Amino acid sequence: MYVIVVYDVDVKRVARVHRFLRTHLHWRQNSVFEGEVSRAQLYEIKRTLEDIVENGDSVLIYELPDGRFNLHVIGVDKSPAGEII
Amino acid sequence: MKRPVYITQMGVLERRGNTLFLENENGKRAIPINSTSEIHCFKPVSLTSGAIKLLSEKNVPVHFYNKYGYYRGSYMPVEGQVSGTVVVKQAEHYLDTEKRLYIARQFLEGIKASMIALLSSRRAERSTIEGTEVEGDSPAELMGVESRLWKEFYSTYATLLKHFEFDERNRRPPRDEVNALISLGNSVLYTVALSEIRKTYLHPAISYLHEPLERRYSLALDLADIFKPITVFRVILRLVNRRQIREEHFSRDVGVMLNREGLKVFLGELNSELDRKVLHPRFKRKVSVRYMVRLEGYSLVKHLLGDRRYQSLRAWW
């Protein structure tokens, strides 16, 4: 399934969340990751993030059926996600 | 679903904090290692020992190609699936001529069916291929039938291409644009077949239609051939006729090769064709073309173990 993860966490934990998410997903821009993951991977992502976040932190995971969505970019596309580098 | 990563620029793969990075003068780019099935490198890429350690832990192979798109080798993590029984059976079916011919003939029927599937989707002339009998008393004779099929296929295929000349298949290096595309596509398909075979218990070096030789995994050649017409050739036809691949996507020295822009277009399209899901009549669910390569492997294992006779793929889409 295709997911978009958006997070707003305390600056002390930003780097940890970033470091963890980039092993599973493509970095899109600050505090935004996206990519195709399996159900098991999504479960692991959720579990690990639950361990990292503390009071006041917020992480949103959008699950997109079939990865079908339209993207409108205004300004620069900092890091286009994709398998061809 | 894990996905392959295609690298079309020079760089160094290294490990930083449990992530794999491609680093070069354009900057750093993280590769989500947990979501990666394999990495294909089309430009010189170096691997640090840290990267190799991470790739081994996550069981991600890295395949290398030269500038003309020929397969040069792989970094393969330690073998995951090992079964002595299957390898012994594989050898037995190779050594017994009757048994070998059965499997080789199945492979050939699969190739023929795929050719017909592609040509009929384009309403092209296919009676000669349909009329070609898959007969032969030795593997060499079957290889002869195969080369006749390909020759016939190429000549019809040439008439379907609206741009670029394609008179004959030539290689090492390819001398025209279409040959460059075919060479690159075949190499990628070969490594895909290899990656999928490694997920089964099969030994990739014991083959049936191709003669097993030194220094290559010929079972991957056997399986890749079944899928060539419906993946590589289908994608080339689409890209050329829609003018998505044009003259400016190639460069030329001794041979013809795709430049970086061309590589991106071609690999993107080939990858999505491999990801394409079609309804599987027996499973009653949709499976990707790439997964069907592995299914061929599984049916072969069943055949070797005597569970169910192997019937190669008859492409229907």
Image (cartoon, rainbow, N blue to C red):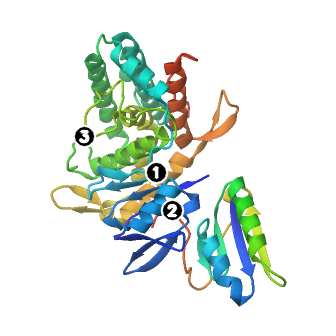
How far is disc 1 from disc 3 in space, using C-alphas?
A: 20 Å
| Secondary structure of residue under mark 2 | loop
Q: Is residue B218 left or right of residue B239?
A: left
- Quadrant where the C terminus of chain B sits is top right
Q: Nearer the viewer, mark 1 or mark 2?
A: 2
Q: Nearer the viewer, residue B65 or B307?
A: B307
Q: Nearer the viewer, residue B303 or B119?
A: B303
Q: Is residue A7 left or right of residue B135?
A: right
Outermost residue toward the right in this view: A55
The amino acid at mark 1 is: Leu
How far is disc 1 from disc 2 in space, using C-alphas?
A: 12 Å
Q: Which residue is mark 3?
A: B169
Circles 1 and 2 in contact, beta carbons < 8 Å? no
Q: Nearer the viewer, residue B213 or B163?
A: B213
Residue A54 visible, this angle? yes
Q: Residue at x 29, y 34 (%)?
A: B155
Numbered circle sitting on residue B270: 1
Circles 2 and 3 in contact, beta carbons < 8 Å? no
Instruction: Rate crowding at label 1 as few (under 14), some (14 to 19) or many (20 or more) other CA atoms within 10 Å.
Output: many
Find residue B168 and report its image quarter.
Answer: top left
Q: Which residue is mark 2?
A: A83
